[in-house]
Structure formats: C-alpha cells, structure tokens
C-alpha cells in the first residue's frame, strides 16, 4: 500500500499550504471502492494535476478517531433515522505528528457540514472529559455536554489526502479501516474497503467526480461511526446501516457480518 508507482508522478503539498483549503464549511460526497481501484484513482488524479499531502515524509498517514455518544446512542440514532440536523463528537489524533483535537461536526438541513475543533493534549484522545477547557469548548459549540457523553467507538485507518490544482477541493482516501467498540469490546476489520470523501465548497466544478464516474465508482453515503457501531454492537438499532453493510460487502467481495 505504501509503494504505489504513481508516487513518482504525483505532486506534493505540505501542511503549510493547506490553510487555503480547510473547507470547514463544505459539501461532502462519499464513495466506496476497494484497493484494486485505488491505484487507478491515483493514476487519474496525477494525470490531472492533483497533489498529495505529505507529512513526516509520508503520503499515507495513520489516523485514530474516538467517537463519543450518549447512553442511548442519540447521535447514532439521529443518523439512523435520517434526522437532517445532527452532530458527531470525536477526538482525533494524527499519529505521525501526535497532534490531537476535539472535533464537533454539525450537519444542517441543507446538506452542509460545519466542523469546529480545538487542540487537546495527546493523552486526552481516549477521553477528553477530564479537561475543563475541552468540556467548555464542547458546551459552546454543540448540543451536548461532556457529562452526557462517553467514548463509544474507536476507528483506525490510513489516509491519503489529495488536493486539486485550483485548491477548490480536497479528497481523502481511507484504507486499512478497523473498528474497536468500547461498549462491547468487539473489533472489526474492513479488509480491502476504501472510503473516498470529496470535500468541496460547492461553487466549483469537480474533476474528481468525473474520474470516479469513469471508473464506475458510485456514491455511497457512509459514516465510519455508524457502520462501525452496526458491525460491533448487536444491540444498536441499525437496520438501515445493515443494508449499507450488504452493499459494501458486494463492493469489496468480502463478508463482514
């Protein structure tokens, strides 16, 4: 996975250039494919001038996220019942650098995602609730308080980030995805699954959409938190997501449940 021949032909972008394309208020489009298609996506992206984010000398970076929810799994249920206005709360660590954040993602009824985040100490990744400043930040930017939440689901994955030449869109390609459920103790690996997420401000045309269409990679709305919960918590209300798991199984040609 780390030695794609395309790396010799794809340009590089560094973190200090990424400020112009944070896209914290954006429209997200998600796709699911497998590792066999991943190199074709990268080849097409290189040919059209996309560049890959490089950190610590690597273009594939490990990420860990911890998702928080209420005792009744309200955030999971809001998504499962198609509530248009909803939130997710997580901590995320960029493993190579150790940078760690508390992040609040809010989706509005127009399909736009807004993300707020604050830096926290790396030791708070597994549970930020002991930090008064982080708790205050959560209360100021979400509908939840720290007392309502517990760490529920850890996700581990490796990410490639691509940026187009015009810096109007950002593309993430997540591989080697694993789930660890902190309620049930169950774990699950997604095998060759690749989640592609296209993040745009919504005003510019996307070459990547044409690339994915040409490769017959179809949109599929997936939430790591919700799919992971479905696969590792049998008590969660998840009929809708079970149907998505079946679709994913067909794409990656591997049984998950």
Image (spheres, helix red, strand yellow):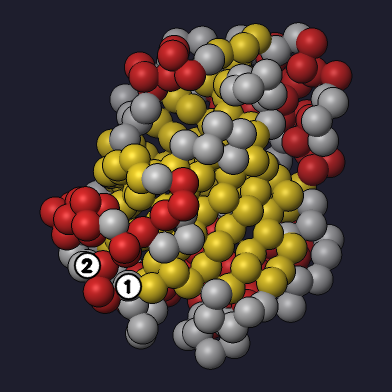
- The quadrant of the image that shows the N terminus is top right
Q: Residue at x 40, y 31 (%)?
A: 200
The answer for how far apart the CA atoms under marks 1 and 2 are is: 8 Å
Q: Residue at x 59, y 83 (%)?
A: 184
Q: Position of residue 210 (x, y in %)?
A: 59, 28
Residue pointed to by mark 2: 144
Q: Position of residue 97 (x, y in %)?
A: 55, 32
Q: Is residue 103 left or right of residue 100?
A: left
- Please tell me which residue lies in front, 45 or 231: 231
Q: Position of residue 76 (x, y in %)?
A: 41, 72
Q: Residues within 10 Å of mark 1 (few under 14, many from 20)?
A: some
- Please tell me which residue lies in front, 241 or 100: 100
Q: Which mark is residue 149?
A: 1
- Please tell me which residue lies in front, 140 or 215: 140
Q: Say which element carries label 1.
A: loop
- Please tell me which residue lies in front, 188 or 192: 188
């Amino acid at each position: 996975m780390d030695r794609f021949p395309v790396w010799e032909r794809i340009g590089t972008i560094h973190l200090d250039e990424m400020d112009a394309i944070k896209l914290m208020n954006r429209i997200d489009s998600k796709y699911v494919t497998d590792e066999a298609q991943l190199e074709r996506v990268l080849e097409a992206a290189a040919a059209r001038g996309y560049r890959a984010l490089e950190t610590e000398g690597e273009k594939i970076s490990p990420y860990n996220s911890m998702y928080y929810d209420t005792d009744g799994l309200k955030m999971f249920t809001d998504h499962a019942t198609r509530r248009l206005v909803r939130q997710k709360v997580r901590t995320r660590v960029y493993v190579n650098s150790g940078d760690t954040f508390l992040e609040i993602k809010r989706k509005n009824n127009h399909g736009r995602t807004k993300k707020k985040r604050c830096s926290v100490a790396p030791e708070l990744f597994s549970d930020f609730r002991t930090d008064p400043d982080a708790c205050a930040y959560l209360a100021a930017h979400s509908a939840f308080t720290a007392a309502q939440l517990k760490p529920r689901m850890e996700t581990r994955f490796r990410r490639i980030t691509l940026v187009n030449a015009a810096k109007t869109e950002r593309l993430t390609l997540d591989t080697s995805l694993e789930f660890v459920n902190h309620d049930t103790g169950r774990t699950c690996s997604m095998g060759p699954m690749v989640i592609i997420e296209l993040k745009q401000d919504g005003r510019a045309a996307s070459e990547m959409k044409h690339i994915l269409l040409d490769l017959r990679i179809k949109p599929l709305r997936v939430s790591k938190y919700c799919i992971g919960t479905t696969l590792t918590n049998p008590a969660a209300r998840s009929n809708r997501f079970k149907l998505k798991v079946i679709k994913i199984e067909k794409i990656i040609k591997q049984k998950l449940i």
